[in-house]
Amino acid sequence: MSSEAETVLDTSHSHRAEAGKVTLTLEQLAEVQPGLAAVMLEIGGRFWRCYHAARAENRRLARFQLSEGTKLLRKAAILRPKYADDIATFIAEDLATLRDAIEAADWAGFEVAFAAMTASVNSLHEVWNHGYLVWRVDPEPPRDLVLEPRPEDR
Ligand code: HEM
């Protein structure tokens, strides 16, 4: 056998993932990933927490929630590449404005940016034929998180 033939990759086997009590093929692993709608619910939760952290003027918490929401949006772009460009633009424009307001502790500016961001979300839902999904921030603050900044974070 020539050395060239020896280096050809063996593609006859499927890669497997060991997960404790079960061994999954990569295809099965992909199959059990959450769908976009499930990730969107989680994203909504992050932006809800971000909003109420900002209302409590808790810059550190608002920054954290925004960052986690942004990471989930990047995962959504991996799950559904057809949305990747729009998600990238949304992050670069709408979320950058939100981030700037948080960093500047410009809470009035944050309200304006958050309303603009919400309008962008719903116009993207419209563009992608999900216009019936009109998102809005829950006006009730989360009860599972202390929103007021700690003295050292003021
Ligand atoms: C802060 C940002 C966003 C929030 C809070 C949000 C919120 C939501 C919510 C609540 C749902 C319905 C989930 C359900 O009831 O199961 C949804 C679905 C959806 N969103 Fe968003 N969204 C955001 C950003 C985006 C962006 C940037 C895009 C497109 C580029 C997008 C496209 C979609 C699509 C296509 C669906 C339908 C899901 C599916 O096909 O399974 N969303 N979103």
Image (cartoon, rainbow, N blue to C red):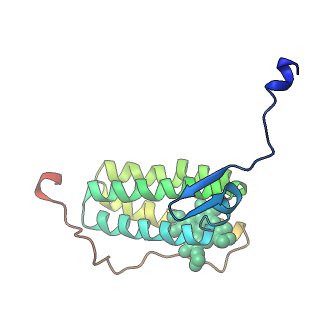
Residue located 60% across and 50% down the image? 89
Tell which residue pokes out farthest to the right in this image. Answer: 1
Q: Is residue 6 left or right of residue 119?
A: right
Q: Which quarter of the rendered picture does the C terminus lie within?
A: bottom left
Q: Which sits in the foreground, 119 or 2?
A: 2
Q: In the figure, residue 40 lies in which quadrant?
A: bottom right
Q: In the figure, residue 63 lies in which quadrant?
A: bottom left
Residue located 62% across and 78% down the image? 133
Check the image and report above or below for 149 versus 144. Answer: above
Q: Which sits in the foreground, 81 or 91?
A: 81
Q: Is residue 42 left or right of residue 87?
A: left
Q: Which quarter of the rendered picture does the N terminus lie within?
A: top right
**Residue 84: x %, y % from top left:** 66, 52
Q: Which sits in the foreground, 34 or 42?
A: 34
Q: Which sits in the foreground, 114 or 29?
A: 29
Residue 17 seen: yes
Residue 122 seen: no
Residue located 48% across and 54% down the image? 70
**Residue 66: x %, y % from top left:** 41, 57
Check the image and report above or below for 150 versus 132. Answer: above
